[in-house]
Image (cartoon, grey):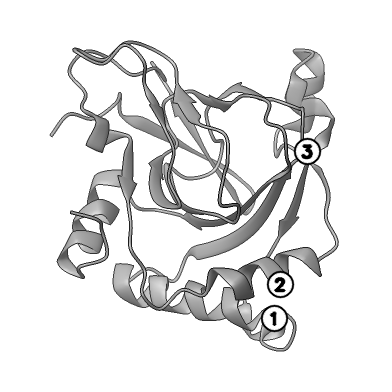
Amino acid sequence: MSTVEPLQKIQLGKVTLWERKDPDINNDMKREDLVTECKFDWLDIEALKLEFDQTEMKPFEHPLKEKCKAENSWFEYTPNWHTYKFTNDMSQYTDTNPETVKCTMILRYILDNKRVVPKYFKQIAGSDLPWHSDPLGSCAINVALEDDTANLEYLGNMAGDPDVHFNYRIGLLNTVPRHRVQPFHQDRRTAKFQVFDMDYNIVREKLIENNAVLS
């Protein structure tokens, strides 16, 4: 199975960052190296939508905000990309976000990883999410809360598949290669379950073992 360049772990206090030598896809990679569509029979998307909509969001702040500012990066200030970050202690959300807590705890059990942490993201209609490589962890499980949503695109070329884009409802994403989401006619709401300290391929294998991926 093909992978991207190895990650270098950088610890900044309690924040773990990953630095990549070459964050683009290449001709040795296959589509399954980037996105794996999942099936979670235990997940209630309507309940997630309700919890998402009742949660107060704010513009995303990059963990390396000063670096973004120095580089005049789009991520220094993101008024059109809103987020809500949960802490690792899910017990405090059982009353307000019970479905999110349930999903997080099931994923922690399946992956045998206590560092699965949820986040909410909203990309405002008409705005884009430019090319980027996620600074935290190397993969995540995203749940698209819209029936119709924009494609996720990866930067680079893949043998036999120059148009590398995906449209999923529930997907395990390799967040190391650079990716983007172009503008769409409606808000894009996403419940993201960030998986720390585990490689994309290992997470994928565990999901397959638990019959949690689409065939």
Q: Nearer the viewer, residue 124 or 132?
A: 124
Residue name at image x 84 percent, y 29 percent: 77
Position of residue 68 measured from the top left corner of the image (x, y, whole percent) = 75, 22
Residue name at image x 30 percent, y 29 percent: 6
| Separation of marks 3 and 2 at Cα, in angstroms | 18 Å
Q: Secondary structure at mark 1?
A: helix
Quadrant hosting residue 84: bottom right
**Label 2 near label 1: C-beta < 8 Å?**
no
Residue name at image x 34 percent, y 52 percent: 198
Name the kind of residue labelled 1 in the image: Tyr
Quarter of the picture holding the C terminus: bottom left
Q: Which residue is mark 2?
A: 51
Name the kind of residue labelled 3 in the image: Ile
* Whether residue 135 can be seen here: yes
195 sits to left or right of 199: right
Position of residue 67 measured from the top left corner of the image (x, y, whole percent) = 73, 23
Q: Earlier in the sequence, mark 3 or mark 1?
A: 1
Q: Mark 1: few, some, or many residues within 10 Å (few <14, many ≥20)?
A: some
Q: Which residue is mark 3?
A: 124
| Separation of marks 3 and 1 at Cα, in angstroms | 25 Å
Q: Nearer the viewer, mark 3 or mark 1?
A: 3
Q: Which residue is mark 1?
A: 93
Position of residue 169 measured from the top left corner of the image (x, y, whole percent) = 45, 52
Q: Earlier in the sequence, mark 1 or mark 2?
A: 2
Q: Earlier in the sequence, mark 3 or mark 2?
A: 2
3 sits to left or right of 23: left
Name the kind of residue labelled 2 in the image: Glu
7 sits to left or right of 206: right
Q: Secondary structure at mark 2?
A: helix
